[in-house]
Amino acid sequence: MQPTFADFSVAPARVSNCGTAYEACHAGSSHLAMSAGARVTLEFEVDAEEEIGEATLKVTALVSKLGGSPGYAPVDLVVNEYPLVRGLTVPGGGDLPQDNVFAVPGRSLRPGTNTLEIRTADDARSMLWLYRVTLDSVYERGRSERAMAADAARNTVFAYTTERCEPFTSSWEPGPRLLFHVDRGEQSLPAQLGWRGADGAESAISFQSNMSDFHGHHRAADGTLAEFRGRIAGRWAFPEGTEDAHVHRFGTEEGWGGGWHSSGELRLLVDDGSGPVERVTWRDQRGNSGVAGLRIGPGGASSPADVTADASVVGASDEYVAAGEIAEHLLDSSQEKWLAGDARAWVEFRLERPVALTSYTLTSANDFPQRDPRDWLLYGSTDGDRWTRLDSRAGEAFTRRFEARTFRITGAPAGPFTRYRLDITGNGGADEIQLSGVRFAGVGPVDFSGYYQRYNEGPIGYRGTAVNAPPSPAAHADSAAEAEKAAEAARLAEEAEQAARLAEELDRAARSLAEAARSMGKMAAWVRDR
């Protein structure tokens, strides 16, 4: 039987191997609300060649309260007109969603299209909130839940609108947008997230299971504490939604058994508008957790460092070679200059390692202010082919010769990139453009150190080094497919191991029973002989 589920925590519902229809229902923030006499119909398929002796049906729901009292919304479950259960009262009374599990007799199923109906009683006095429905062959129980979780975890880039409030007050004020992406290829949604910024500010939040909301706290760099909450504003499959963001990518290793072992790639993005982060902590919905302390360098986390020493000029639209006024002078410490014989010019730089640019400095040359740049664009790239605009300036002016002016990149650091291109589109009216210096300042995570802990194991060492090039969407799709295959292989291996253990236990039990039978036979013979 194919994985069969309907996830009503999102709208429209996320489904597999089924179609849905509703009567007297409406979508809530994280559920489907069913009033009195409501009906939800799921049509699902059973392969003609498949014989199912029994199926496992799980319905996750709760009954909304009646004021301070438990609610009342009995429910019937019907499979192909076979009444599986009548008048079920879901426990909890508006507390937490409850998992209600039922055995579906194989005789109630048929090859081809089948129908499951969930009906609320006509005399229901409150709402039934329906969250999820899964259906599996009893020998493959949990398969649909795993498929549903993997499907939900495909979109791992999240954006939230946020609000902050002083503790013990109710005065909520709009906060900055939060954009984040934490992914180590395990196809599990985050449950909790914490981070510390390079400025010392800290945040810790916890999510609704369907990722619709979060709640937590924020401590500013000056120590001011605030409640912190957010509402989802967008969700995408990586790399969508991260085009203008700073995604850290690390090749990682796990430390166990006395050595370090390759453990794939970790991608980290946390952008709350305040700049780089130096630590990220997380726990996913499976119970796995991790911590990554980023070594931001060069120059430390709190102050972006000059990275020009690692740069080289890789191209320029023009330079006055005969006079030695070439683009390479832009990066040295002399007062020599670069002169281009046009009113528009560009120069391209390459850095030895990826850096997220936070600012750049231009220094005017020795003469002719009319040659000074006034209008320009700055771009970043990882491959020299695809460029991202980082900054745009118009009408700028240098007031003296050899004046160094610093221009900050607004918002979170962009990149990291290994190539930067300065495209000068206007000057003070001359037919040439000149500069005597260009310097770059930025932050570029070199590596991280931390720990990782799977839900059923102890903590292990976890470390990583920066990866330069961002993956293509196709490469990500391939890696996601490989991760899914690996997860399925791991599941099958675990089931095989469990089967082997069960076979061994049954064999021991059989030997024990045989020994007991022989002992009883001897006792019976002894009794007869007496």
Image: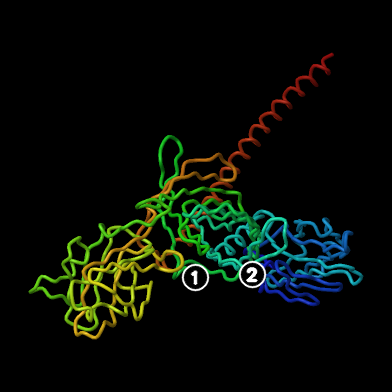
**Res 250 visible:** yes
Q: Residues within 10 Å of mark 1 (few under 14, many from 20)?
A: some
> Secondary structure under badge 2?
strand
Give the residue at the far left of this rendering.
322
In the image, residue 191 above or below residue 507? below
Residue highlighted by disc 1: 241
Q: Amino acid at mark 1?
A: Gly
Classify 10 Å Cα crowding around label 2: few (below 14), some (14-19), many (20 and above): some
Instruction: Between residue 132 and residue 348, name the one nearer to us.
Output: 348
Q: Is residue 503 left or right of residue 327?
A: right
Residue at screen point 49% across, 51% down: 279
Report the side of 253 relative to 6 (left or right).
Answer: left
The amino acid marked with disc number 2 is: Arg
Choose between 238 and 46: the one closer to the eye: 238
Can you say which quadrant of the picture contains the N terminus? bottom right
From the viewer's perspective, tell me whether residue 440 is left or right of residue 215: left
Q: Position of residue 213 (x, y in %)?
A: 65, 63
Q: Tell me whether the residue at label 1 lies in contact with that at label 2, contact meaning CB atoms closer than 8 angstroms.
A: no
The residue that disc 2 covers is: 14
Which image quadrant for residue 456?
Answer: top right
Q: Quadrant of residue 75?
A: bottom right
Residue 1 in sight here:
no
| Quadrant location of the C terminus in the rendered image | top right
Q: How far from the left and from the top, in percent, is residue 323? A: 9, 73
Q: Residue at x 25, y 61 (%)?
A: 311
Residue depicted at 40% across the width and 52% down the height: 296
Circle number at residue 384: none
The outermost residue toward the front is 400
